[in-house]
Amino acid sequence: MADPFTPGELTRPYPSDVTYPYESIMDSFNVLRNDPAIIGLNDAITIRFNTTTPSDQVDRAIVDQYADMSISMADGMGQNLGAIYAAGRENGELPKVEQLLAKEGGLIGYYSSSNPSKNFFGYDRPYIRLTASLKYHDKPGGDAWGSTGGSFPSGHTSQAYWQGTALAVMLPELAPQILARTSEASNNRVIMAAHYPLDVMSGRMMGNHITERRMTDTEFRPLIEAAGAELRNYLEAQCGDTLANCIAADTPYLSDDDSLAVYEERMTYGFPQIGASGQPVIVPANAESLLLTSHPTLTDVQRRQVLALTAIDSGYPLDEGNIVDGWQRLNLAAAMAADVVVNADGSVSLAGDPSTPPGTTPGGNPGTAPGTPGTGPADPGAAPATPGTVPAVAPTDADNSAAAVRTRAVADRLATSGSDFALPGLLSGILALTAGAGLLLVRRKAAVRS
């Protein structure tokens, strides 16, 4: 049995123990809410997901509605490792992980309620605005539509993302799968008609930011590192082999390619680009700390370049442009999974990108155990000259850039998988229609988030 954190470690003040004004990174919603085309599409996607999702996925959505998602999302680690992790959490054999990630009182998100932002925006939930068009999904005796609190941003999504992002930091080898499962838990809020896609997109931004603040806090980060060591040691002990071999022998939640595709799909939900495409990305300040375990040999500046190279294109709803940090564009799954090469001049490129100059050396490849991070001067946030973007038009087969490969993967998935994000005709129709118009007893329990 592993030792939990001491009461002193849990109750001492940390620099990141402050309430952050998260509405500042998503306040473009106050413009979007007055755009009939965007709100019409926001409503239409919600209705479609709520009324057409198969019953087995509805059942999973109901589980995530009430469960501690840091446990219910265990299958993102794979069939066997996920079962081992879930059993360890339920049996109290992962006390440090519990103390940081638990739904009630988890220390990573303890100071980061979505309620102030909900109150700031004051937008009604789908089941209040669109009741007649929706199906009610719930467990017997449940109260899934009971809250009258605001809809934007999604608190469940924020919680899922600070829990899932922290787990991905602890297990970078499985980051794409863990984050894809996190995106599923978040999408389940739309299925339940408790939230709209824009709520989920903003909740992702908030959840990533919450984990970044804890990772940037050099006094708090050792707690995450200790919990990660506890988790990795437990998985290896219970699996009976090295973590790499256990992962290789397991049945994954999704393949790497499918994990990256669904994560990216849920970053934009098929919304059109309403702003200029191809704009430089402003990498969020200190976001490079989220890549410390997936790319331990890179410098902070190089990690920021990886985040820029893997960012999605500009102009989608909630992209604040060049006004504030680009949390909407931050594709953390792609960044953590990126196969990176270090160029002769010290800059980095994505492996397989024909624009990579000669004379490069591998660096910061995923699938390695957390190690000592590289050091380097802090980058004040300037984007590289050529930011990573997802083309607005389909690339040709001759284009083998990393961005083009990602775009073709998503297009192939939409064409062959019957994805919920394939909305042929829906977008144009909406636009035409609207054109004219437990272990933390030493702390108080955190407020229940919805």
Image (cartoon, rainbow, N blue to C red):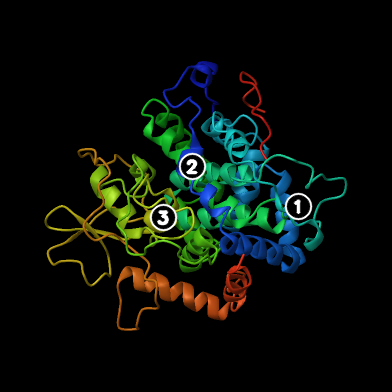
Mark 2–mark 3 Cα distance, whole angstroms, equals 19 Å
- Is 420 or 196 nearer to us in this picture? 196
Q: Amino acid at mark 2?
A: Ala
Circle 3 sits on which residue?
A: 329
Snapshot quadrant of residue 274? bottom left
Dot 1: what SS? helix
Question: Residue at image x 50%, y 56%?
Answer: 246
Q: Amino acid at mark 1?
A: Tyr
On residue 229, which mark appears?
none
Up-down relation of residue 445 to residue 130 (above or below): above
Circle 1 sits on which residue?
A: 127
Q: Quadrant of the N terminus?
A: top right
Q: Nearer the viewer, mark 1 or mark 2?
A: 1
Mark 3–mark 1 Cα distance, whole angstroms, equals 29 Å
Q: Are marks 1 and 2 in contact (CB under 8 Å)?
A: no
Dot 2: what SS? helix
Sequence-wise, the earlier of marks 1 and 2 is: 1
Circle 2 sits on which residue?
A: 166
